[in-house]
Amino acid sequence: MRILVVLTAKATLHLLDGEQHPSGFWAEEFVVPYTLFQAAGHTVDVATIGGATPTVDQTSIDPQFLRYVRPAGSADEDAANAAEYVRVIEQAPQLRSPLAIESLGEKDVAGYDALYISGGHGAIGDLPKSDELAQLLRWAIAQDKPIATVCHGHTALLALRDGEGRWPFEGYRMTAFSHDEELVTNMAGRLPLILEAELTRLGARYEKADAIWDSHVVVDRKLTTGQNPYSSKALAETFLRQLEEA
């Protein structure tokens, strides 16, 4: 099968206090699904707005930051994971020459079996603002393509509207990076949007794990959502099972 992976092209995020905060895509949210998709024998393409080379958020490949977020884990495991993320990112040819979302038409979307939208705070800065990405997703929905998204990748869904002006995922069960998780980041109170609040406002039936940073995946019809970076593996495995069953 062919899977299209959508990534943010933003290297910084403009915060409410005016700071241009270093950002980008979150390593685990790309590397883990990308590796599992390829291991399952699927073809993976990467697309960004403008075909720009995506930037990895440096904190997502920093073992000390990974330890700070989940101190109950192993320091050796965090270091090994960070090294693996760097290795895969450096060797993935799709990241060096991504497709331009603007160049993809309805027939191109028809050539893919599924779409996966990766996250990272950088996604807030460009994914919800792209008319071309919104059109690509409308085509995917019309063609009944399975869509998976994790963490802040959901921002790509915010601008979608159907022919009657309604959000196409109104009433869907879904999860995403929680407000509680945002509050423990160094951008708390300065972000241009809180994803949990935005999805709820649009009519999503939002769910989250009992504790912050726990893995949580929700499937509703053709939409699969993951809460946070640590949901990446479970989300990818769930998505692959859906594709196999389809």
Image (cartoon, helix red, strand yellow):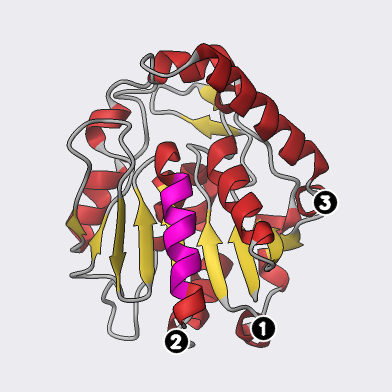
Give neighbour class at mark 1: few <14, some 14-19, many 20+ (Cα, 10 Å). few
Q: Compared with residue 233, is residue 48 higher up or lower down, i.e. above or below?
A: below
Q: Residue at x 47, y 83 (%)?
A: 246
Pinpoint residue 134: horizontal percent, then vertical percent: 49, 69
Q: Are marks 3 and 1 in contact (CB under 8 Å)?
A: no
In magenta, the rendered stretch is: 232-242
Q: How far is the residue under mark 3 from the one under mark 2?
A: 30 Å
Give the number of the mark in front: 3 or 2: 3
Instruction: Give the residue number, with chain letter if any, for mark 3.
Output: 93
Mark 3 vs mark 1: which is more N-terminal? 3
Whether residue 214 is in magenta: the answer is: no
Q: Nearer the viewer, residue 223 or 78?
A: 78
**Tag 2: amino acid:** Ala
Secondary element type, mark 2: helix
Is 147 on the left or on the right of 83, as rendered? left
Label 1 to label 2: alpha-carbon separation: 14 Å
Q: Residue at x 57, y 15 (%)?
A: 76
Local crowd at mark 2 within 10 Å, few (<14), some, or many (≥20)?
few
* Position of residue 237 measured from the top left corner of the image (x, y, whole percent): 47, 58
* Marks 1 and 2 in Cβ contact (< 8 Å): no
Per the image, label 3 sits on a secondary structure element best described as helix
Q: Earlier in the sequence, mark 1 or mark 2?
A: 1
Residue position for label 1: 111
Amino acid beneath label 3 = Pro
Q: Which residue is mark 2?
A: 142
